[in-house]
Image: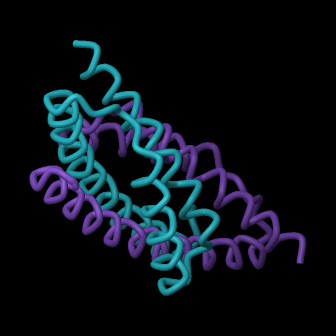
Chain colours: A cyan, B purple
Amino acid sequence: MTNPQLARLRASIDNLDTALICLMAERFKVTQQVGYLKRDLGLPPADPEREEQQVARLRALAQEAELDPDFAEKLLNFIVKEVVRHHEVIAGK
Amino acid sequence: MTNPQLARLRASIDNLDTALICLMAERFKVTQQVGYLKRDLGLPPADPEREEQQVARLRALAQEAELDPDFAEKLLNFIVKEVVRHHEVIAGK
């Protein structure tokens, strides 16, 4: 049987994960719109300047929220890689 | 100059990212507590059975939220890898 304190902490993790999944779903809905717009405007799928600004912004936010800024940057890279993959699919349509 | 529609979509992405960073910071605060508790209870840092339940749960949630379930699973693996690394540091203290 699971320790009750561990079970309580895991229930909080599950609630946070539900929120994370919903936010992530919304984020991809927006980036999908960005993908179609970029295709219509003839813009390339990746935008290194925008990504650089995002990294700086998220690192600062992470620091304030007491999250490891390196992890925040790795997370953004992980998400952006998936987004660029989607944009390439859209651009290739 | 950035297209106004693109700027508007990017502002939404930035707002969602702020929320994501804050949730992620809270998630690591909880998993850190889990790490200390596991150390005190003599439990191993990783828990494959719990992770399997999380994967199944998040894939179902992703489907409902119209997020690619494979991406949700990859994201969880990415986060759990970081969490286990933290737990190993705590266990080694």
Q: Check the image and report above or below for B24 versus A80.
A: below
Residue A84 horizontal side relative to residue B30, left or right: left
Q: What percent of the width, then of the height, locates residue B50?
A: 55, 50
* Nearest to the observer: residue A31 or residue B87: A31
Image quarter of the N terminus of chain B = bottom left
In which quadrant of the rendered view does residue A12 lie?
A: bottom left
Residue A82 horizontal side relative to residue A2, left or right: left
Image quarter of the C terminus of chain B = bottom right
* Nearest to the observer: residue A35 or residue A68: A35
Residue at position x 52%, y 40% in the image:
B52
Q: What percent of the width, then of the height, locates residue A91?
A: 27, 21
Q: What percent of the width, then of the height, locates residue B70?
A: 41, 30
Residue A75 horizontal side relative to residue B86, left or right: left
Residue B38 horizontal side relative to residue A54, left or right: right
Q: Check the image and report above or below for B70 versus A17.
A: above
* Nearest to the observer: residue A58 or residue B24: A58
Q: Check the image and report above or below for A66 versus A73.
A: below
Q: How many marks?
A: 0
Q: What percent of the width, then of the height, locates residue A64?
A: 49, 87
| Residue positioned most to the top | A93
Residue at position x 22%, y 28% in the image:
A42
